[in-house]
Amino acid sequence: MTTDFIIVAYNKPDYTRLCVKSIKKFWTLPYNIYIVVNYLDKEKEINYFKNLYLNDKNIIVLEGINQSSTTIHGKNGEFTQKYIDRPGYVDGCKIASGSWYGAWATNIGIKSGKGKYVCVLDQDTIFLNKDIIKLIQLSEEYSFIGNRWCPGSVFSYLGVNNWEEGMVRPMLSFAKREFYDNIEKEKYVEKKIWRSSPWNCDYRDMAGNLTWYAEQKGLKYLVLKNSYRDRFRKDNGLWKQHLLDIPYGEQAWINDTPVFFHATRGGYRNHQALERWVKETKKYLDID
């Protein structure tokens, strides 16, 4: 019943460290954590995590992808990513290089593990309590579980452009390993769209392939109750129930229990925002 957690670390080591802390605090079943380090300075950044987790036998640090050629540096440690100058096969959107590199780094992590379950997490996420292990029970009924539904014209080549159609945007994605293995095994091809791995690098979001595969195969998948779009409501809805005071943040629930928080960003990538996430997350996890 081991779960393999996959975290792609890039440029914000405190985020990764706090994500790991939340797993260790709230996941009460056997697990391994695979930290795939996408880097600007390979030796420095990989060695940082190897030294940090030197005595944690269930934390494995892996070399990811060199992102130095597409990273744009700003002041106070701020940064952004160039877009890769070619359209995605699905909807013609240019591909954010962060999604491209994150996709391949996630593949490295998934293929390195052998656990029965796979949980992929963005580094700016944390678990909120021990009810998160209910994901295992949910995976008996659903092919995969994600934290947010992204509506709109994400499959526009099918002539679809409405609120009901879209894909799961998993800053948290949980499934049995066999789900990923089946996608990989089939080398899924449809309408000349090459989808050779679970994490599709030819789409504007690296997770689009999971929704596509499940839809084509008639598999059920689950999107957790999520507060992301409630920020646009006049009464703020679920937004008012957030356990962390993070602007643009989103929280997800299993049943009525909050289990997951994602910092998100929107236009919120400045130095003060990064520090606020670290401060609020440390406070919630009760660590120095």
Image: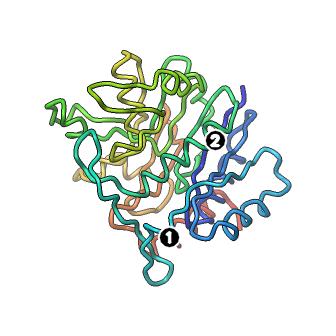
- Above/below status of 190 relative to 30: above
Which residue is nearer to you in this view: 217 or 92?
92
Residue in view at x 50 percent, y 37 percent: 173
Instruction: State which tag comes first along the sequence, 1 or 2.
Output: 2
Q: Is residue 172 left or right of residue 239?
A: right
Point out residue 66 in the picture as x, y percentages from the top left corner. 55, 62
Point out residue 119 in the picture as x, y percentages from the top left corner. 58, 37
Which residue is nearer to you in this view: 287 or 40?
40
Point out residue 270 in the picture as x, y percentages from the top left corner. 42, 74
- Above/below status of 34 relative to 245: above
Picture disc at residue 81: none
Quadrant in the rendering for residue 89? top left
Residue in view at x 45 percent, y 71 percent: 273
> Which dot, 1 or 2, sits closer to the camera?
2
- The amino acid at mark 2 is Phe
- Above/below status of 39 relative to 184: below
Mark 2, residues whose alpha carbon is within 10 Å: few (<14), some, or many (≥20)?
A: many
Q: Residue furthest right?
A: 55
Which residue is nearer to you in this view: 184 or 217?
184
Residue in view at x 38 percent, y 67 percent: 268
Picture disc at residue 5: 2
Kindly identify which residue carries mark 1: 274
Point out residue 13 in the picture as x, y percentages from the top left corner. 62, 65
**Image quarter (top left, top right, bottom left or bottom right) of the N terminus:** top right
**Image quarter (top left, top right, bottom left or bottom right) of the C terminus:** bottom right
Mark 1, residues whose alpha carbon is within 10 Å: few (<14), some, or many (≥20)?
A: some
Q: Is residue 233 left or right of residue 251?
A: left
- Above/below status of 108 relative to 118: below
Asked whether the beta carbons under mark 1 and mark 2 sit within 8 Å of each other, the answer is no
Residue in view at x 44 percent, y 73 percent: 79
Element assignment for label 1? helix
- The amino acid at mark 1 is Leu
